[in-house]
Amino acid sequence: MSSPSDGFVRTHPEIADALAEGRPVVGLETAVLTHGLPRTGRATPDCLRPDGRIAGLLGDDVRWDDGAPLNLQAVSLVSQAVRQANAVPAVIAMIDGVLRIGLDDDELAALALDESARKASNRDFAALSVSGASAGTTVAASMHACGLAAPEPIRVFATGGIGGVHRGWTERPDVSADLRALGSEPVVVVASGAKVILDLPATLEMLDTLGVPVIGYRTDALPIFTVGLSEELEVPHRLDSADAIADACRRHWGEFAQSSGMLVANPCPAEEAIDPHRMDVLVDAGLAEAAAQGIDGSGVTPFLLGSMIADAEVDPVSANLALLIANASLAGEIANAWSTDRSV
Ligand code: PSU
Ligand code: MN
């Protein structure tokens, strides 16, 4: 096994120590930093109101700087939420050709400001590494990195929303590598369902095919990212505590000898969720405009977010931030429940 500090995959010493001692660690992706959220600053999002539930998940020290990069502050607050839950955040990214599990603050800041940073999925590791590139890692790439962490793999991961089966898949099979990773990497991913722009029934079907347990956290309805809960789609299973989820993980990978990941679907906090009907209108208009401008692939999510930010009636940044923080906090709880009683 490689040592944590050698080669093209490196585990940060703080993470390596925590893993060696069996302390709780939560993996975090960075495609949301490089491609998912805007860099420009803005006024304090509503979800960080001092009396709000989200601010409570961050402890007493909630700071927001209107002039600082939004994406950087978002990931910093997500890390803070993991620490507040008594777990160690492991921010994953490729920096100068090295896949890094755990970054220092100055490296994270440099990546957040780097407009040339790429979006890395599993197919991209080797070529980007040889080119010495820096990249945000998708859920798929970050889940794989969790398995490469030394001296022990990371088992718990948090994100906003996973990628999935895109609308129009019968014409062009645009299916996120996140699904393949969920089918093959033994990591429990806490997310508020999948990106709104996807074909959600098709995404659920594919997760079923891949043998991925989709577990609603305190919900029977499928969480749909920033819009809250689906009125039509149900999750196959529901569990109501971090302990129960950690038990399910143990049995999934242990006695039942499954090798797939697990998806814990945690709804966007209700007070921050966007009206689904307004969201439908915005997504349809945004997708049509993106197509008209020839934007596709990794450009679509930032384009849609930009067009929604310009809409006076919704606040997708606040909703995104709220669910990212809530998911990090729940992942921290699951990591604690997992590490106190490991048998896999
Ligand atoms: N959800 C968002 N914004 C994002 C992502 C998800 O609201 O930027 C990122 C995640 O990193 C996810 C990736 O893994 O998009 C999926 O991209 P693709 O569909 O290209 O596989
Ligand atoms: Mn794709």
Image (tube, rainbow, N blue to C red):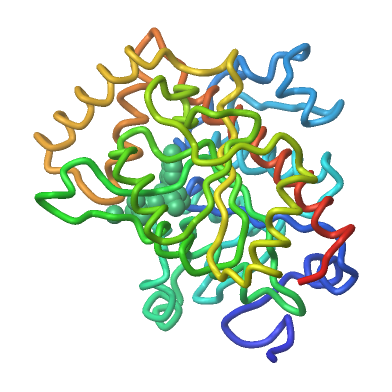
Q: Position of residue 32 (x, y in %)?
A: 49, 46
Q: Position of residue 237 (x, y in %)?
A: 56, 40
Inspect this view and state whether residue 115 appears.
no
Question: Is residue 159 shown left or right of residue 335?
Answer: left
Q: In which quadrant of the rendered view does residue 80 lie?
A: top right
| Quadrant of image for the C terminus | bottom right
Residue 166 vs 267, above or below: the answer is below
Q: In which quadrant of the rendered view does residue 132 lie?
A: bottom left
Question: Is residue 320 shown left or right of residue 155?
Answer: left
In the depicted view, which residue is nearer to us: 334 or 343?
Answer: 343
In the depicted view, which residue is nearer to us: 69 or 19?
Answer: 19
Q: Position of residue 91 (x, y in %)?
A: 65, 57
Residue lying at the far front in this picture: please name it: 256
Which residue is pictured at 25% across the width and 17% down the height?
281
Inspect this view and state whether residue 146 appears.
yes
In the depicted view, which residue is nearer to us: 197 or 182?
Answer: 182
Residue 223 vs 204, above or below: the answer is above
Q: Count up the numbered dots.
A: 0
